[in-house]
Amino acid sequence: MSLAYLTAALLAQGTPAPIVHSVPARPGSAIAATYEARPVVTTRQIGTAAGTRMGTMRCTWKAEIAVERRLAGAGVVRTLAPTRTMKGSRPGDCISGRRAIDRDIAALAPDIRSHIEMVAARDQQDLRAELETVSPSGGQ
């Protein structure tokens, strides 16, 4: 069995705060670009529970960490490459281990933060180029 879910509680508690960069849009003004992590977690149940015998159930999880860029006032959201994959496993079944998996991923917040920073830094030049094509010569 495989379950996929977006961990809203994780976003509220464990992932790093969004990063906001101010990018010049035209002479004398700037636009705020917000970069935020969006983890999508997939779980997979392996092993068996054999009645009164000791079970071999284990839940493997994989978190795909995507970074979304949101431009202030524009309502434009873009998912940026690359995504980062984090993996782990927990004893027991996936349903009862869901909170523990969220805690495992939340413990990786420093790694997630560095991924957001790396993607945001790579995106700065692309974002400036996009803003120039939307508003050539400063919008004049």
Image (tube, rainbow, N blue to C red):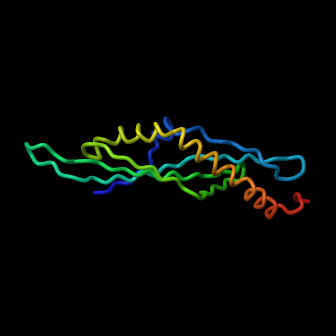
Q: Nearer the viewer, residue 39 or 70?
A: 39
Q: Residue furthest right?
A: 140
User: Is 38 placed left or right of 70 in the picture?
Assistant: left
For the C terminus, which image quadrant? bottom right
For the N terminus, which image quadrant? bottom left
> How many numbered discs sit on the rendered protein?
0
Q: Nearer the viewer, residue 72 or 41?
A: 41
Q: Give the residue at x 86% y 63%.
A: 136
Q: Position of residue 35 (x, y in %)?
A: 64, 47
Q: Residue furthest left?
A: 52
User: Is 91 placed left or right of 129 in the picture?
Assistant: left
Q: Give the residue at x 19% y 47%.
A: 56
Q: Position of residue 3 (x, y in %)?
A: 34, 54
Q: Give the residue at x 28% y 41%.
A: 96
Q: Give the residue at x 64% y 45%.
A: 117
Task: State whether residue 132 is above or below residue 71.
Answer: below
Q: Position of residue 88 (x, y in %)?
A: 37, 47
Q: Nearer the viewer, residue 74 or 108?
A: 108
User: Is 74 placed left or right of 82 in the picture?
Assistant: right
